[in-house]
Amino acid sequence: MSSLSWAISDTWVMAKRNLTVWLRVPAYLVFTLVQPTIFTLLFRYVFGGAIHADVPGGYVNYLLPGIIGQTAAFASFATAISLAVEVQKGVVDRMRAMPMARSAFLGGRLLADVVRMTVTILVIVGVGYAVGFRFHGGFGRAVAMVVLAIVLGAAVCCISATIGLWLKDEESTQAFGMIWMFPLTFVSSAFVPVSSMPGWLQAFAVNQPITHVVNAMRALALGLPLHDDLWLSAVWLVAIFAVFAPLAVRVYKRVS
């Protein structure tokens, strides 16, 4: 086979490896769905009555794109932790010693994560419909919203893969993920309008990738004007891929 065909074949084998592990541990997939479902119900019925959102359909329509964006970002926790565990157990060393494409290990992991994120996001859309969410922008925009969420998740997975391979420790990786992921998702427009935050906090909230991506997803879902959010989201996501995808590969080559 050519080098490209060899890399694609090996990447698919590694993706199937990860998907098979998840299918044999259904509790993992269940818990992956439980957290965003709890967030959806919590914000919809506990906090929703106190938060005003000036969008078609009210707060539930404002909320769900934020939940989906958060779900895509939080899905990267599994990437970081799994890679840290595999480094600890020597799996990475064994994979590098095998006659396969060097990109297949990380590429397969990313492909499997994309499949998992897609299923999770579709389930959360179903939960959203059950609690009152509705698309107002048509089928094409709805698909574009889901695709944008998946790209966001894939980009954050590149960051998480770098962190997991670098720290090489499950507990440290999980703790570090909380430190940078929670502020990034909650200090954004995912759950509340940025205008409701203190002025000093707004400066951060309006100039970070989660806000732009969630705003673009919300505009796509509800048929609202996209303004600058779509192209700013594209710039942020391309920059993340450009920086962290090569960095993850570099750390993977050096890890031992």
Image: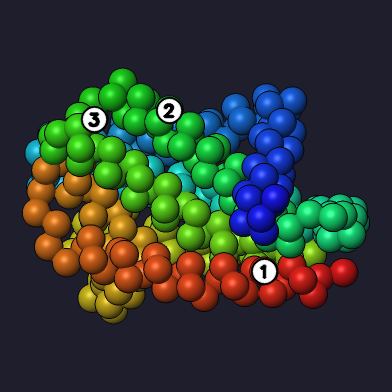
Circle 2 residue: 123
Residue 249 visible in this rendered orientation of the protein: yes
What is the CA distance from the residue labelled 1 to the residue labelled 3? Answer: 40 Å
Between 94 and 59, the residue placed more toward the observer is 94
Mark 3 or mark 2: name the one nearer the start of the chain: 2
Circle 3 residue: 133
What is the CA distance from the residue labelled 2 to the residue labelled 1? Answer: 31 Å
* Label 1 close to label 3 by CB (< 8 Å): no
Residue 98: x %, y % from top left: 87, 54
> Quadrant where the C terminus lies?
bottom right
Residue 234: x %, y % from top left: 31, 64
Q: Residue furthest top?
A: 130
Circle 1 residue: 249
Q: Residue at x 12, y 62 (%)?
A: 227
Residue type pointed to by label 1: Val
**Which element is circle 3 on?**
loop
